[in-house]
Amino acid sequence: MNPFFDFTNFAISARHYEKNYSIRPQETSEDTLREYNDVDYFKLGKLTLSKVEYYKSSKVYNLKQVEYIPYGKRVDLIFGKENGEFLNRYYAGFEYTTGDLVKGLGYFYNSLSLGTYFRESIFEDQALRYQTYYFSPAKKIKKHNLRWLSHFDYITGYNRVKEDDLLYLTDSDVRGFNVIREGTQKFVFNNELINFTPWKFLGFKFAIFTFYDITLLSPKNKFIFSGNFNNGVGIGIRARNENLSFKTLQFRFAFYPKHYNGEMTYSYDLFGEDDFTLNTLGITKPEIIKYE
């Protein structure tokens, strides 16, 4: 059998929601302040084909004793109808996701998503997104375990009904960098080298990490690498105690080499952190492909 069609699970899911504002700006229309338009209802359905298994590991993304890493593939076909205040239209989307452990190289997770609205013969508000997560095999140096983690994300839109539909720089694109940047296509590349140490103190386990983040935001019809360049480099420490409600505590310091006059040059944060988990490759609720 062709491996592309080798699936073991089939699922159908559906979703219905409505959005109505009690207070909003007065001047709203199909293409003005469109985010405040009422949506009478939005019905979405999804067909999912998948083949998913898990392998058990530890000291990958978190300080947990056990982490379950998915491998396999999933195909989603999304369809729906929007009945809005100023227009009615249909929606169709496609997503193909894979996870694979390559011996000697590490783990690769890839996701390709494409979605579009359409009415009559007009296709609009299209979004295209590609993501990759990677982590290397563990490198043991005495009692320390080192891993390299990477995340790549590219998103762009086509035929946006609202011409000023924009993507914005978030503080997860370049960690801690809270400034205004905008464009119509975005490229994000996050890298982290993490050292799971043997240190223990009062029930806490510790990991030290360094990171380097890059983000490019480019206007429409421009090559992405000609866009606005933003980067950050930093170091941090994570401490985990299974007996505490927040589990993981993180301190992070970052420096931003590329900045303008009056903008932040560095940041530091101390906060509780939720455990990071990869998409399970399992069944999820129907959603449009987000342009954000």
Image (spheres, helix red, strand yellow):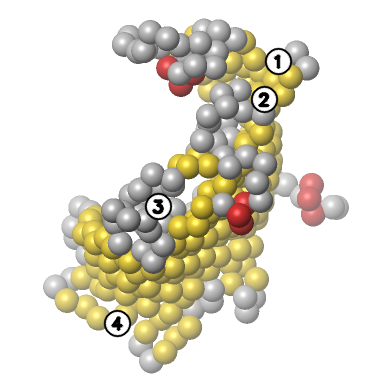
- Residue at disc 4, secondary structure: strand
Residue situated furthest right in the rendering? 1
- The answer to whether 62 appears left or right of 93 in the picture is left
Q: Mark 1 = which residue?
A: 119
Query: Cβ–Cβ below 8 Å for labels 3 and 2?
Result: no
User: How much space separates mark 3 and mark 2, taking CA atoms?
Assistant: 28 Å
Q: Along the horizontal axis of the image, is 269 left or right of 51?
A: left
Separation of residues labelled 2 and 4 (CA atoms) = 53 Å
Disc 1 from disc 2: Cα separation: 8 Å
Q: Is residue 105 above or below residue 276?
A: below
- Is there any visible trace of residue 233 in the rendered image? yes
Dot 1 and dot 2 residues touching (CB under 8 Å): yes
Q: Amino acid at mark 2?
A: Glu
Looking at the picture, how far across and down is residue 137, in whole percent? 53, 76
User: Which residue, as the protein is rendered here, is positioned at the far left?
Assistant: 202
Question: Of helix, strand and loop, which one carries label 3?
Answer: loop
Q: Which residue is mark 3?
A: 172
Q: Amino acid at mark 4?
A: Pro
Element type where label 2 sits in the image: strand
Instruction: Choose the circle earlier in sequence order: 1 or 2.
Output: 1
User: Could you say which disc has been placed on residue 124 in the image?
Assistant: 2
Of residues 148 and 37, the one nearer the viewer is 37
**Mark 3 or 4, nearer chain start:** 3
Residue lying furthest front:
261
**Residue named by callout 4:** 198
Q: Earlier in the sequence, mark 2 or mark 4?
A: 2
Q: Residue at x 24, y 62 (%)?
A: 268
- Could you say which quadrant of the image residue 155 lies in? top right
Circles 2 and 4 in contact, beta carbons < 8 Å: no
